[in-house]
Image (tube, rainbow, N blue to C red):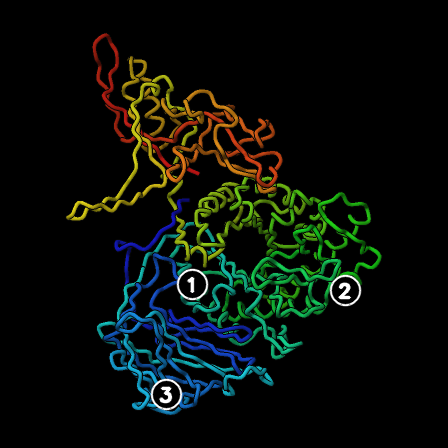
Amino acid sequence: MGWALVAAEPHHRKGWLKRFDPRYWTVDFARPMMASVTCDMPAVLRVEAVFYRKQDLAGLIWEAEDRWDHPLLAYETKRDFRHTQLTFRWRSGGVKPLDALHGPTLTIEGRDAGGASRAWYVRLWNYAEGTAEDAVVSLDFDALDGGFMLPGEADPVWAGDIDRMFISLVPPSYDGGESVLGAPVAGWAELSEIVCSGSGSVLAIGDVVIPEQGLGIASGYDDSYHLTPARLVRQIVQLGYRGDVVHYVGMSHYMRLEAAGGGFCASLAGGALNAPCAVWHAGFAAACREAGLGVIWSLSYELFDAYCWGGWKQRASDGAPALTGWAPPSTLLSPANAAAMGYLQLVARAFVAIGAAAGLPLKFQVGEPWWWITGGGRVCAYDAATTAALGAASVPISDVREALDAPQLSMLDALGTLLATSTAALVAAARDEAGAAGLTSHLLVYLPTVLDPAAPAVRRANVPLGWAAPAFDVLQLEDYDWVTGGRGAETAKARVAMTFRLGYPIEEQHYFSGFVLAAENRAQWAAIADAADGARRAGVARTFVWALPQVARDGFLAFNGGDEVQAFDAVDFPLAIGREAMVATEFSTQIVSSPSGHEQRASEWAEARMRYDAGPGVRSEADVRMLADFFRARRGAARAFRFRDPFDGSSAADGGLPAAADQMLGVGDGARRQFALVKRYGAGDAEQVRSIRLPVEASVRVSVDGLETAAFMMTEEGEVLLDVAPAVGVAVRAGFLFDVPVRFAEDRLEASRATFMAGEIASVPLVEVRAPW
């Protein structure tokens, strides 16, 4: 598999889009209200909303810049809205009507003709013909006025520099007050017969279509609630993802709410799902079916803390709730709490029913069910329901990382039984809802937590034997903290451990690779792509990338053909011939010169690429035969191989024998064991760090905190894997000999017979390739 991080360029394939296409509107709001936008028919979009407070407000948004689509699929940024006319039919219910104070208002944010930031407030009723809940609205951006009453309060809009615009939707009782509504209010608005005309009405849009590339994609409703389902599915298909989409239904947007204790908590009044969520997911399921995609509905034991009833939460021995590191935090539901588990079962039924109504094969995932372990090693298993269920088996455990006695181990086993019982009941509910159609069950396990080497006993509670095959149809494994933290080599061992403990063969396992939380860490996609390839080579049935929002944000692109392009043979170029090679180091720099002679320079490569000419090393007819044989075996330029640079093949500054302290690899954090080999050139701001992927076997020497150690092994990717993770701040260094991955630069090798029966080759050009893993 090949991969890249891409940005849109002028030469990418483009299509054309009418501005205000209903697929590309978004919706947003402040908690606790909920809203969604869908577009099931051409030229029509519909917003569903549920309001809980008088001050709730939803915005139906059009943005000049596409911040949500993959760079290859995004529409162009065009902030000039002049020479554009928009008309649509407005219909609504359960929201302030068009003619009311605080009725639907078009807020336009941008800059005036002088470049000063400002906003205009366009009352739609001023441009409507019809009734307050069924009218045709006509907007000409060259003749548009803000202000409530026209013409007396007219505030002319300058449409030449707009960032975004949004239509506000509020409950009928909205008056700026903060009180809670007596009961939730459902509202909706529909824009149909949408027509955009004028010379400013057309936008270019990326229209790249990647062939199917073998990976699946995962996504989550909490990250995509504001987009239309059609927009998501378009990205999935055109980026080459096929088969099943793993769709995490989230932990903060699907639930109905009721007022409780000055806030709002999850409610079953009227059903498990709020109306906007149900409508959105029905549209998503239908769009997936039309695109030939399946859906694995993923539901976890995680719930937004602010919406969770106090008795439902896992708690530590001091009563503190289990809280994740997200901001704002989520909490974990107690597997022993009947009300919490009954709630999850009804949610599972609701999503399975949506899939059934869409005609999809029914697939359900129990996502990351576990007993939460705090940073201090405290297990959150002392909530009232769990304590009551365990009875005398509930004993104090101050830190699961310490040596535990028999009663404490027995408690962990009992917790495992509770967890397995709860997941079995959840799957049973989903299966019952599926009925005769049948259901495929999946279990997602997060390896870094359940197989934490610092707390080996935790697997008794969090990988219970009650999960052993055939409790689920598919075991899904996830390990992104290891991958992005440079500990990817631990996955293979963990997969073996899980297979041994639960008994699912490799062909009944899936693997989740990813994800990159922050955009500034987009370089982590290299490790994620490597991990995905490794899982496929290991033989898992399916590999998924987690997750679509990060894929789109960072421009991650996967494609077939990378293995063929990067084909590599782990063999050495004949060393005797290579010692006489000529060496060239090259960069790629774009240089733009102005008429005055000034230059702008942009370096396109983070690392240099090496070129060699091995011709000078060919001294005899035997050398010619040896080289020709090697050339044929590599199929010319088709396959890469190892080459020893005659001037730069050692970590030592003088090119001599390596020492254990030659190169700084990194510093410990108490958990990381895997360190990539690098060689540093220059110093200070000018320092260049070169990745070394082909160390010479048995040449690697490692030091930890200044002391040489033999307690390490080399991974297949050429990285150091220490037996023990270095403490925080401890320096890890290494020395080594290394080769360069190269290929023949040409598919032709020329030789001539010279005097004294010696072979003579004028030139044997070689070029470095990027490491094929």
Residue 443 visible (yes or no): yes
Amino acid type of the residue that numbered disc 1 sits on in the rendered structure: Val
Q: Residues within 10 Å of mark 3 (few under 14, many from 20)?
A: some
Amino acid type of the residue that numbered disc 2 sits on in the rendered structure: Ala
Looking at this rendering, what residue extends furthest in the top direction?
756
With respect to residue 749, does 680 lie above or below? below
Q: Secondary structure at mark 1?
A: helix
Residue 359, horizontal then vertical, whole percent: 50, 68
User: Which corner quadrant of the image does residue 70 belong to?
Assistant: bottom left
**Which of the numbered marks, if any, corresponds to residue 415?**
none
**Which of the numbered marks, if any, corresponds to residue 148?**
3
What residue lies at 67% left-to-right and 56% top-to-bottom?
372
Instruction: Give left or right: position of 653 versus 513.
Output: left
Looking at this rendering, what residue extends furthest in the right direction?
392
Mark 2 = which residue?
384
The reply to whether dot 3 and dot 2 touch (C-beta < 8 Å) is no
Residue 480, horizontal then vertical, whole percent: 54, 49
Q: Residues within 10 Å of mark 2 (few under 14, many from 20)?
A: some
The reply to whether dot 2 and dot 1 touch (C-beta < 8 Å) is no
Query: Which mark lies nearer to you, 3 or 2?
Result: 3
Q: Residues within 10 Å of mark 1 (few under 14, many from 20)?
A: many
What residue lies at 52% left-to-right and 81% top-to-bottom?
55
What residue lies at 55% left-to-right and 50% top-to-bottom?
510
